[in-house]
Amino acid sequence: MLSKPKIKDMISLLKECYPEPICALNYEKDYELLFATRLAAQCTDARVNIITPVLFGRYPSLEDLAGANLAELEEIIHSSGFFRAKARDIVAASNMLLNEFEGKVPDAMEELLRLPGVGRKTANLILGDIYKKPAVVVDTHCIRLSNRIGLVDTKDPEKIETALRKALPPEESNDFCHRLVLHGRAVCTARAPACAECCILGICKKVL
């Protein structure tokens, strides 16, 4: 694990490189982010951003999604992969939101995890981006970079989340995870990390 001073320096450097740590998924409503994130499982954000305008154009309300014909919904989201399971989860979660949460995506981890198809990654994204609460979104970029940099030494998402919650200032955690995604796509890629272009080169365990 990196020292606190090095973590502080890394946060500052990433802020300089990525001043706007926004989510890559496009959405307007809270449930749209929820379902876009579900579609993003085993699928690229770019592909999801192509699918969601069609999806939410065809089903413009939560009530419409709750009553969607599964075969039609599956056809719309087919290119995201695992479309049958994703379609079932979207319809079931829409009904649960309407019946148990008055049509509002809940703002507590325990309640979010009750929704079909929602795991800790999705729940943390909702808590951080929608409700501006401290959150640690552990996706593939976070797993790869956290290990490379020296923040963690495990591939287990829950252990990484726990470790990062301890290491990061709560007010920085959500934006930090977004910055890791941006850095993982632009510089620290899976196959060929461009270390010479890395803004945190002097901190990274891979180099040191």
Image: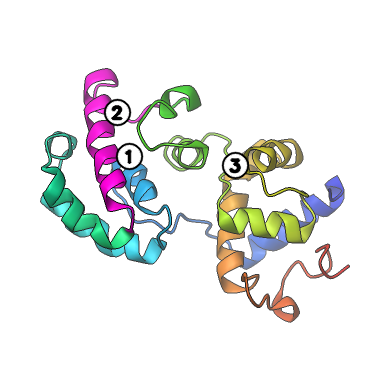
Which sits earlier in the primary sequence, circle 3 or circle 2? 2
Residue 202 numbered tag: none
86 part of magenta stretch: yes
Q: Is residue 93 above or below residue 189?
A: above
Q: Compared with residue 92, is residue 12 higher up or lower down, i.e. above or below?
A: below
Instruction: Find out whether the residues at labels 1 and 3 contact each other: C-beta distance under 8 Å.
Output: no
Q: Which residue is drawn at 40% across and 25% down?
A: 114
Work out whether residue 205 or residue 76 is closer to the camera in this orientation and state it: 76
Residue nearer the viewer, 193 or 174: 193
Q: Is mark 1 on a helix, strand or loop?
A: helix
Amino acid identity at mark 1: Asp
CA neighbours of label 1 inside 10 A, class few (<14), some (14 to 19), many (20+)? some
Q: Which residue lies under the disc numbered 2?
A: 104
Residue in view at x 48 percent, y 56 percent: 22
52 left or right of 196?
left
Residue designated by label 1: 30
Tell me which amino acid carries mark 2. Lys
Visible residue check, residue 59: no
Circle 3 SS class:
loop
The residue pinned by badge 3 equals: 136
Give how far apart the Cα atoms at labels 1 and 3 are: 18 Å
Residue 122 place in picture, x, y as percent: 45, 41
Tell me how far mark 3 sits from mark 2, CA to CA. Answer: 22 Å
Q: Is the Cβ of the residue at disc 2 closer than 8 Å to that at disc 1?
A: yes
Describe residue 175's horizontal placement relative to residue 43 as left or right: right
Task: State the extent of the magenta-drawn residues as a range.
Answer: 81-106
